[in-house]
Image (cartoon, rainbow, N blue to C red):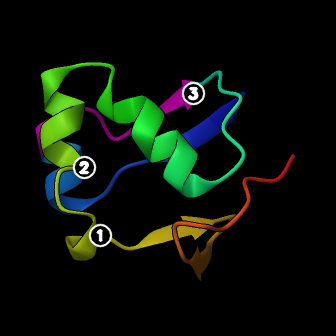
Amino acid sequence: MIDVIYFAWVRERIGMPSEQIETDAATVADLVAELRTREERYALAFSDLSALRVAVDQELCDFDAPIGA
């Protein structure tokens, strides 16, 4: 189980500030791909990855960063 926190317009499009997600994703990109398939609001929120910044454990990273334990 991981905690995902959304900010700014991603938060607005998804409609919640954070959520706990059960996932087997190995990287941030894998997690985003998984989230996109959930509902249209997720697909919209993650439609333009060039406009997004991501962090793992409060450290900015690239989408190919591993999601640790």
Instruction: Work out how far the residue at label 3 is from the one at label 2, CA to CA, in angstroms.
Output: 18 Å
Percent x, y of residue 49: 27, 64
Single out the mark in the foreground, 3 or 2. Answer: 2
Callout 1 environment at 10 Å: few (<14), some (14 to 19), or many (20+)? few
Q: Callout 2, which amino acid?
A: Phe
| Lower position in the chain sequence, tag 3 or tag 1 | 3
Q: State the residue at coordinates (67%, 36%).
A: 2
Percent x, y of residue 29: 51, 54
Contact? badges 2 and 1 (CB < 8 Å): yes
SS under mark 2: loop
Q: Is residue 62 left or right of residue 15?
A: right
Q: Which residue is mark 2?
A: 46
Q: State the residue at coordinates (42%, 40%).
A: 33
Percent x, y of residue 38: 32, 19
SS under mark 1: loop
Residues rendered magenta in the picture: 13-20
Instruction: Work out how far the residue at label 2 is from the one at label 1, CA to CA, in angstroms.
Output: 8 Å
Q: State the residue at coordinates (20%, 73%).
A: 51
Instruction: Work out how far the residue at label 3 is from the one at label 1, CA to CA, in angstroms.
Output: 20 Å
Callout 3 environment at 10 Å: few (<14), some (14 to 19), or many (20+)? few
Q: Callout 3, which amino acid?
A: Gln
SS under mark 3: strand
> Between residues 27 and 61, which one lies in front from this camera angle?
27
Q: Could you tell me how many numbered marks the image carries?
A: 3
Residue 19, numbered circle = none
Residue 20, numbered circle = 3
Q: In the figure, 64 relative to 12: above or below?
A: below
Q: Which residue is mark 1?
A: 52
